[in-house]
Amino acid sequence: MPDDRIDDTSGIFFVGRWSQIIIIIAKTLPENLENSKIMSDLPNCPKCNSEYTYEVGALLVCPECAHEWSKSETEAPEKARVWKDANGNILQDGDSVTVIKDLKVKGASSMLKGGTKVRNIRLIEGDHDIDCKIDGFGAMQLKSEFVKKA
Ligand SMILES: [Zn+2]
């Protein structure tokens, strides 16, 4: 019967397609594994330290504990520099510091005296790496090597 024959051929065709697809999947699988190995330079999971983290857009996902975090979260600490005062103590945003010596202030008629207390500093990039406000001087920038943590 002609109708049966059509069904048969389409059935064979269908199976043929599927086996092709399976072959394609099998062929690409080792490549995918290779890729995931290359991608293992992603940071480990901060929760369980799994190395099998993978990227989903801007997120990193841990397949072992399902923790998700953003890439910038893990990249930031790497880039973060450490600000140290004259004694080598680590400074943080919001710290209070004391100026350890008289400093000339650009545009100001008086010196910034050693011993001046500076509250609520903000750490910034650059040669003068502390952003602050000092009574009598206003907003200015200091070098961390000329202050010590109060
Ligand atoms: Zn994890």
Image (tube, helix red, strand yellow):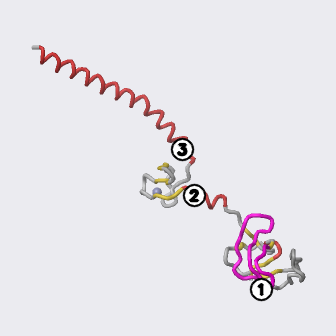
Question: Mark 3 to mark 1: distance in Å?
Answer: 52 Å
Identify which residue, 11 or 31, lies in the foreground: 11
- Amino acid type assigned to the residue bearing label 3 in the image: Met
Disc 3/disc 2 C-alpha distance (Å): 17 Å
Name the foreground residue: 61 vs 133: 133
Query: Which residue is at the far left?
Result: 1
Residue type indicated by callout 2: Ser
Please name the residue that numbered disc 1 is placed on.
Answer: 135
Numbered disc in front, either 3 or 2? 2
Disc marking residue 39: 3
State left or right for residue 139 relative to residue 73. right
Does the CB distance between marks 3 and 1 fall below 8 Å? no
Which residue is pictured at 52% across the width and 60% down the height?
A: 46
How far apart in space, not on screen, are marks 2 and 1 (Cα)?
Answer: 36 Å
**What residue is drawn where x is 46% and y is 54%?**
62
Name the residue rendered at 48%, 33% in the picture: 31
Residue 30 sits above or below residue 83 on the image: above
31 to the left or right of 5: right
Residue that carries the numbered disc 2 in the rendered image: 72
Percent position of residue 36, x then y: 50, 41
- Secondary structure, mark 3, is helix
- Sequence order check, earlier mark of 2 and 1: 2
The quarter of the rendered structure image containing the N terminus is top left
Q: Is residue 47 magenta?
A: no
**Residue 120, image x, y percentages:** 69, 80
Q: Secondary structure at mark 2?
A: helix
Q: Secondary structure at mark 1?
A: loop
Residue 132: x %, y % from top left: 74, 77
Q: What segment is highlighted magenta in the picture?
A: 118-141
